[in-house]
């Protein structure tokens, strides 16, 4: 497991020390990365920087709001910021002539506890890991990513973790988390946005290191697993020999570093599919910025209300989820304080932190919604970004709902453009496309112009990340929280003037090259503004991966037929192949993993008659009765099986055979949850937390477009304490 190997070797070297000669060379390299100093009047005294005053102002505006201090010295400004902004600003103000691995780790060190030799050693170890990874990734997919962006977060996480005193397990978690925090497409090279790639990667590494210290975990095979980062780059074997000679040979100290990072300025091979419409981001931006509720048919407006209300209930339910508490502790450690609120939470935080917390909570139970054509879960990133942006802009409920519809439309349609090859490569659609969807929502709520919205979509696309190897870990929901937070940040940066390259999705080295082997922008804009993808947004009746929902329906049907676990000898479920690709965990260790076990899904469906959050607790995942029944479930695949269908054969102990066929799962487009069923789901989630206020919150969410402000929604949402009890959702009638 590469994350564990990195952590073990890095911590050993940091404990033993890298040696005086290597340390002296590293110290000199770090000294060359000191931020550009400013005069009292704000003029740069160094001739070469990676960011001009507009970029610096944009960073400050996104971090602090429009009331951020103006002229300052680089040192004072960097010191005053939270560690994430500090890392971003440090890298932005470092001389551009300094090699990127050193700008990266120097930024990651800003504000870390370690000083002196230990800080220098941490920087050298992180820079060497980042350089070796960049050298190893030589293929055409990786070539679409700028070197600091494609691997920088990993090196920065190592540096920040070592400097922050992480132990081996915490450091391994930081590396695993950072595998989902890639950024930086080649199309933006030479633009102000491209100049921030090292800074974005450094900030991501600091976030990963802090999450790891707080106890957040990722998949131990996030790098090398079958759906991990290296596979997403098309180079699963790239890590072979990566640590050979590590600690005795320091390639990053050579001038220039050797072996060299491959030249990735040349465009990779053209993805399949037509070039189609020019500048998809521009078309999306013009659509989103002009959208008003008056443009929408009632069906689309109502779908937007349902999308919003569904995840509001989820946010309240999960506001005190153990993983959410770890994320909240991380944000407190990072000092992301402010005046914004997250649904169900007591603290006041920055808008970025509010978006991250809400997005994480709305998705952590895997109970949200799905645009089935793309397998995007749009509600959590879009609504979280819209509600955080509304607090920045003091926006009305109608503007929030318009933002929600705009975000779902843009995200779903970008997913259509990228096609199924995007998911097949290992990217988590809600982590990647979710970034752009959230940016569209935030931009609409902030009332950005079409030109500003186009830049917001470009910035968000540049930050898009997340691999499906993380399914079943705490990092999966982080994909969604970061989508919301980064989408909001992208909109704020665009509003403040940050710019990237034109046609950021379709141009050579852009998002299409980095994330998918196929690209069909014409399909994405077909019916834009007249046909509404949000009407096809399906709501989950069960708290797990949606591809297993037909099997749960079948299990509930088996229960309704009078068969019990004691009657059953064996179960054979025939499903679409993707079910085992996503839901194939045979022996889940905990509740999060059980959400991705089709065997567990059938077991709790039969035993409990439902599959709500309680059925995916750690206790239920390890319950002997559930474990024993799981072992009697077999799953077979049939490529012709529709994605919302399954066939289940039950062999009873008396020798009888019973067949159950589900043609369309509950909650699918063909069998959608009614408003009454969605309200019941909301009560399931919110009533144990809010009691009688749950009904008021449901009405407030479903009528938010009539509200002058969103304040009442946050007031009604809590915080409050959970009432003990076991709740389940009824299955299909």
Image (cartoon, rainbow, N blue to C red):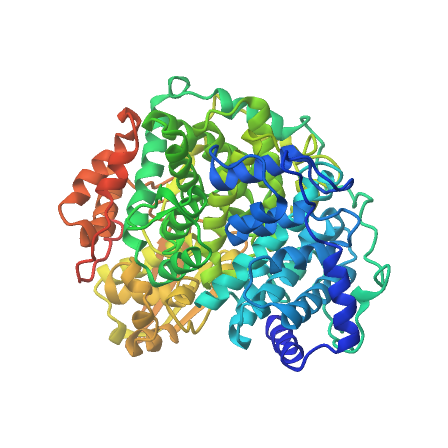
Quadrant for the N terminus in the image: bottom right
**Closer-to-camera residue (411/49):** 49
Residue furthest left in the image: 692
Which residue is at the far front?
Answer: 40
**Pick the front one: 444 or 280:** 444
Q: Is residue 436 visible?
A: no
The quarter of the displayed image where residue 721 is located: bottom left
Question: Residue 520: x, y in percent?
Answer: 65, 35
The residue under the point 38% across, 39% down is 670
Tell me where residue 664 appears, x and y as whole percent: 38, 46
Identify the residue at the far top of this view.
Answer: 294
In the rendered view, tell whether residue 108 sits above or below residue 272.
below
Residue occupying the point 21% across, 35% down = 699
Q: Can residue 18 be spotted in the picture?
A: yes
Pick the residue in front: 274 or 566: 274
Residue 535 appears left or right of 729: right
Q: Residue furthest bottom?
A: 16
The number of numbered badges drawn on the structure is: 0
Residue 34: x %, y % from top left: 70, 53
- In the rendered image, which quarter is residue 295 located in? top left
Q: Quadrant of residue 400?
A: top left
Where residue 232 sits: x, y (%)? Answer: 65, 56
> Quick check: 616 left or right of 584?
left
Between 319 and 595, the one lying in front of the other is 319
């Amino acid at each position: 497991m590469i994350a564990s190997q990195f952590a073990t070797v890095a911590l050993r070297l940091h404990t033993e020390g890298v040696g005086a000669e290597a340390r002296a060379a590293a110290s000199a390299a770090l000294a060359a990365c000191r931020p550009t100093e400013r005069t009292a009047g704000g003029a740069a005294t160094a001739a070469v920087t990676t960011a001009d005053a507009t970029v610096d102002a944009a960073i400050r505006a996104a971090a602090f709001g429009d009331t951020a201090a103006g002229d300052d010295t680089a040192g004072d400004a960097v010191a005053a910021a939270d560690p994430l902004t500090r890392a971003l600003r440090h890298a932005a103000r470092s001389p551009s002539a300094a090699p990127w691995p050193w700008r990266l780790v120097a930024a990651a060190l800003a504000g870390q506890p370690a000083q002196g030799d230990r800080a220098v050693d941490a920087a050298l170890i992180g820079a060497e890991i980042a350089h070796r990874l960049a050298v190893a990734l030589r293929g055409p997919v990786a070539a679409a990513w700028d070197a600091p962006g494609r691997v920088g977060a990993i090196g920065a996480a190592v540096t920040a973790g070592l400097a922050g005193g992480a132990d081996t397990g915490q450091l391994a978690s930081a590396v695993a988390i950072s595998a989902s925090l890639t950024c930086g497409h080649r199309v933006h090279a030479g633009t102000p946005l491209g100049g921030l790639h090292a800074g974005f990667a450094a900030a991501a590494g600091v976030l990963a290191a802090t999450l790891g210290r707080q106890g957040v975990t990722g998949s131990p095979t996030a790098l090398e697993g079958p759906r991990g980062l290296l596979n997403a780059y098309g180079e699963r074997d790239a890590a072979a020999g990566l640590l050979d000679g590590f600690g005795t040979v320091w390639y990053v100290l050579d001038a220039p570093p050797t072996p060299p990072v491959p030249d990735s300025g040349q465009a990779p091979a053209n993805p399949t599919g037509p070039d189609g419409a020019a500048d998809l981001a521009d078309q999306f931006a013009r659509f989103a910025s002009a959208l008003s509720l008056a443009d929408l048919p009632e069906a689309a407006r109502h779908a937007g209300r349902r999308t919003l209300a569904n995840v509001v209930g989820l946010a309240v339910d999960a506001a005190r989820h153990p993983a959410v508490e770890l994320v909240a502790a991380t944000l407190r450690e990072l000092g992301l304080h402010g005046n914004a609120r997250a649904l169900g939470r007591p603290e006041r935080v920055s808008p970025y932190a509010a978006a991250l917390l809400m997005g994480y909570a709305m998705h952590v139970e895997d109970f949200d919604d799905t645009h089935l054509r793309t397998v995007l879960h749009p509600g959590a990133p879009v609504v979280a970004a819209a509600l955080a942006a509304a607090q920045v802009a003091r926006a009305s409920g109608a503007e929030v709902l318009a933002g929600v519809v705009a975000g779902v439309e843009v995200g779903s349609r970008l997913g259509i453009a990228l096609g199924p090859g995007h998911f097949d490569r290992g990217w988590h659609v809600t982590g990647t496309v979710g970034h752009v969807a959230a940016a569209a929502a935030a931009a609409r709520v902030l009332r950005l112009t079409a030109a500003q919205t186009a830049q917001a979509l470009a910035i968000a696309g540049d930050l898009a990340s997340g691999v499906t190897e993380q399914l079943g870990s705490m990092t999966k929901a982080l994909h969604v929280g970061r989508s919301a937070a980064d989408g909001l940040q992208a909109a704020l940066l665009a509003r403040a003037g940050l710019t990237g390259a034109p046609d950021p999705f379709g141009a050579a080295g852009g998002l299409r090259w980095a994330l998918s082997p196929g690209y069909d922008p014409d399909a994405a804009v077909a019916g834009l503004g007249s046909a509404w993808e949000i009407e096809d947004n399906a709501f989950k009746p069960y708290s797990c991966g949606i591809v297993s929902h037909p099997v749960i329906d079948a299990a509930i049907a088996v229960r309704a037929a009078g068969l019990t676990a004691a009657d059953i000898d064996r179960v054979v479920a025939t499903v679409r192949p993707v079910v085992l690709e996503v839901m194939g965990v045979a022996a889940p260790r905990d509740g999060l993993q059980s959400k991705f076990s089709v065997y567990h899904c059938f077991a709790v469906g039969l035993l409990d008659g439902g599959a709500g959050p309680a059925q995916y607790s750690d206790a239920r995942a390890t319950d002997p009765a559930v474990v024993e029944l799981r072992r009697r479930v077999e799953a077979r695949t049939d490529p012709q099986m529709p994605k919302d269908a399954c066939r289940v054969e039950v062999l009873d102990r008396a020798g009888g055979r019973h067949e159950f066929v589900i043609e369309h799962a509950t909650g699918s487009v063909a069998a959608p949850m009614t408003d009454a069923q969605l309200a019941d789901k909301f009560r399931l989630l919110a009533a144990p937390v809010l009691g009688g206020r749950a009904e008021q919150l449901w009405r407030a969410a479903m009528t938010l477009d009539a509200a002058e402000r969103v304040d009442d929604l946050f007031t009604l949402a809590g915080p409050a304490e959970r009432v003990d009890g076991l709740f389940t959702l009824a299955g299909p009638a």
